[in-house]
Image (spheres, rainbow, N blue to C red):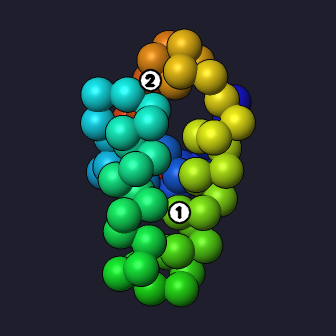
Amino acid sequence: MYFTVEEENLICLYHKSDRRRTMARLRADLPDMAEEMRALARQTLDKLESMSDADFEAQRFRLTDE
């Protein structure tokens, strides 16, 4: 699964112990996000939903400033 730098940074900000908890934290903040950020969050959630828990655990998410 390929994540953009922006998606990966968002995952890092909301990362919890597993994929489902990370997704739940991200979903919980959707109403408070600006429209552009909400679109990025939904795009990221779509990718997270399509991957398995094992794939999520194997993924190395790194916060970058690019």
Q: Secondary structure at mark 2?
A: loop
Of 12 and 16, nearer the camera is 16
- Callout 2 amino acid: Arg
> What amino acid does circle 1 point to?
Ala
| Apparent side of residue 11 relative to residue 35 in the rendered image (left or right) | left
Residue 51 lies, in percent from the top left, at: 66, 29
Sequence-first disc among 1 and 2:
1
**How many numbered markers are drawn?**
2
Left or right, 18 with respect to 48, comes to left
Of tags 1 and 2, the one toward the viewer is 1
Name the mark on residue 9.
Answer: none
> What is the quadrant of residue 33 in the picture?
bottom left
User: Does residue 11 appear in the picture of this structure?
Assistant: no
Residue shown at 59%/53% (left/top)? 44
> Measured along the vertical axis of the image, is residue 64 above or below residue 62?
below
State how far apart marks 1 and 2 are (Cα). Answer: 19 Å
Q: Secondary structure at mark 1?
A: helix
**Above or below, comparing residue 25 to residue 37 in the picture:** above
Quadrant containing the C terminus is bottom left
Which residue is at a point 45% across and 47% down the rendered structure image?
A: 23
Point out residue 37 in the picture as x, y percentages from the top left corner.
Answer: 49, 75
Please name whichever residue, 12 or 19, is drawn nearer the observer in this view of the structure. 19
Q: Pointer 2: what residue?
A: 60
Q: Residue at x 44, y 23 (%)?
A: 60
Crowdedness near tag 1: few (<14), some (14–19) or many (≥20) residues, C-alpha within 10 Å: many
**Place of residue 50 in the rendered image (x, y in percent of width and height, measured from the top left):** 70, 36
Q: Please give the residue where the numbered disc 1 appears in the rendered image.
A: 41
Q: Residues within 10 Å of mark 2 (few under 14, many from 20)?
A: few
Q: Is residue 20 above or below residue 4?
A: above
The reply to whether residue 45 is in sight is: yes
